[in-house]
Amino acid sequence: MKGASQHASELTWRGLLLGALITVVFMTANLYMGLKTGVTFSTSIPAAMLSMGVLRLVGGSNIYENNIVQTQASAAGTLCNVILVLPGLVLIGHWADFPYWQTTGLCLIGGLLGIAYSIPLRRALVMGAGLPYPEGTAAAEVLRAGDTSGDESQRGGLRPLIGAAALAGLVGLSTTGFRVLADGMHTTLAAGSALFRLGTGFSLALVGVGYLVGIGACLALLTGVAIAWGIAVPVLTAMGSAAARAGDGAAQAVWSEKVRLVGAGIIAVGALWTVAQLSRQIAGSLRSALASARKGGTGADIPRQERDLPITWVAAGTLLLALLLAGLFWIFAAGAELGRLHGVVVVVATLFAVLFGFLMAAACGYLAGLLGSSSSPISGIGILTTLVTAVMIPLLIGREAGPEGDRFVIGLALLLAAVVVTTASIANDNLQDLKTGQLVDATPWRQQVALIAGVTVGALVIAPLLSLLYQAYGFAGALPRPDMEAGNALPAPQAALMTQIASGIIHGALPWTMVAIGAGLGVAFVALEAILRRRDLSFPALTVGIGIYLPLEVVVTIAIGGVIGWLARRRLRARPARDGETLARRRGVLIASGFLVGESIVGVLLAAADTLAGRGSSLVLVGPGFAPVATGLGAVVFTAIALGFLRLVSRAPPA
């Protein structure tokens, strides 16, 4: 363990400046790709790699300073999740653009609330729940492998990590960049009028995630796949849903428009169950934090590795943020002519955002520990919040909302969902970062300060970046100028889905039966989880909902990684001499981390290239006719790498 003197350079001005620059660069790429595809990249690991490279050139860096930079820059990958909802205000015409102070205020307040919530949650979820935190663990391995200031036992892992990163980066460039390899394969089978879908992706990063999260969570994900694509989609297509479409298009439409809502129902029940299960640990964390505050906050009597920002500061800051949030809601509702209900709406909206935001932060923090930040269902949280708010607001104010009418009701539901999504995203990410810090012996309160800086920088630049992209491309269904080419518009798919849900509820067109079925299944899976937990078996109910909600190819690829890890452990345990088992597992973690590193960095670079080029697919080398060959090549390459990965992690190193 390092001495206290070596931690004096943990939080530095040069680190904060570098973190701010990385935040802006990665946020630009993430916003573009998120509006284009609905997917954003986790930036913690690429930021750690970039930080190590830059600070090594400057000299005098250490693992703690690099950890601070990646903690701060991780805001670029999470604050951008506001695009899952916020563009909906432009799509419905409530906003003509992204007003600077309202957009900045929403992101800043929501992000700071997420940090505030993660402080008491740290003891419950990072220290007390025994969760793997796959991306936090991967980031720690990256920092350790690249550290040049520690002892030899913490170094020497850079070779397998860099090799895996290079391989994953090459595959990522060949799939998403040049398109000479397909990024997955799938087929739709028909049994009469019932449609079944099979498929997998070829993402090595997702294989790495599956390896790190373990077989229990992967089995729960596959259960969700079986429900969605083995039962729900075939039954609904046999009953005539999406009958006007054929084959794969019909199956995808039924899943997207109906079956995903079953997953949202399971996620809702599973999230409430998760929070209830963790309530004792969360209450214990709060009591511990209050006791710490009474003893002097961050005094010398508390080990450095357990020092958070004082809970009294956190409580005062949360109250101030709630007041600022009330002001934001007051301004937003000013044009609705609500009369006496204006103040009531503001109070109810503020209380909902603060309290429901905490519940979702706890649920997402748990999922970050279980599956990783990238696989945490933030868009599912957005759907759940949109469902709840779109039901709640009409009950509160009726349909008399002045000249805005239903448009104001939909807009307020989306605004509330945006606040909750931002809060949950940042808490989700911060807990992952705090796990990294725990593994590398960092100081929690310094990481919390770094993320405050990251959220502040990100919030200050996100509105101009969103406005720039909207004015340059427009959104599908909402162009800023009539002479713009609709074919170049950014789809903003997640925001369009949230808007569709809110509008469907307000206009009475949402398939509530699907949500109710999901809630019923959620109760059943929660009961199963409780039974299995008594036998020391892991089968998280919440993850079943994620398996239904996430695309088939994503879930199956994660599961492949989990199966590889399970098979490797069985082979290692079957050997007569198990002395090398720990080293073999460490090598597996490093390779899985390398997969995450390589694909993430290539994804960010491709996003930046697309942004600079001003068009999509700027690197594509082949035409559509090459697709069957690309699929075959992708399958061969992916299978070979997966088998090679299994062989490497199943082989104990020599003594």
Image (spheres, helix red, strand yellow):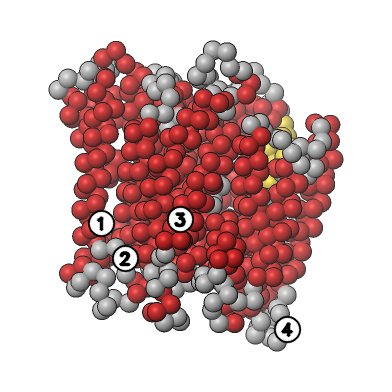
Give above or below for 140 relative to 470.
below
Res. 402 in view:
yes
Report the amino acid beneath label 2.
Asp
Query: Residue 550: which quarter of the image?
Result: top right
User: Which residue lies under the disc numbered 3?
Assistant: 17
Left or right of 589 on screen, residue 480: left
Above or below, 385 relative to 89: below
Task: Label 4: state its secondary structure.
Answer: loop
Task: Say what amino acid the circle numbered 3 marks.
Answer: Leu
| Circles 4 and 2: CB atoms closer than 8 Å | no
The amino acid pointed to by label 1 is Val
Residue at image x 22%, y 18%? 337
The residue closer to the viewer here, 225 or 133, is 133
Residue at the image position 72 percent from the left and 42 percent from the top: 177
The residue shown at (26%, 14%) is 402
Q: Which residue is mark 2?
A: 308
In the picture, measured across the screen, residue 618 lies left or right of residue 222, that is right
* Residue contact between numbered discs 1 and 2, judged by CB atoms under 8 Å: yes
Q: How far separated are the C-alphas under marks 1 and 4?
A: 50 Å
**Nearer to us: label 3 or label 1:** 3
Residue at the disc numbered 4 = 654
**Vertical side of 265 occupied by 486: above or below:** above
User: Which is closer to the viewer, label 2 or label 3?
Assistant: 3
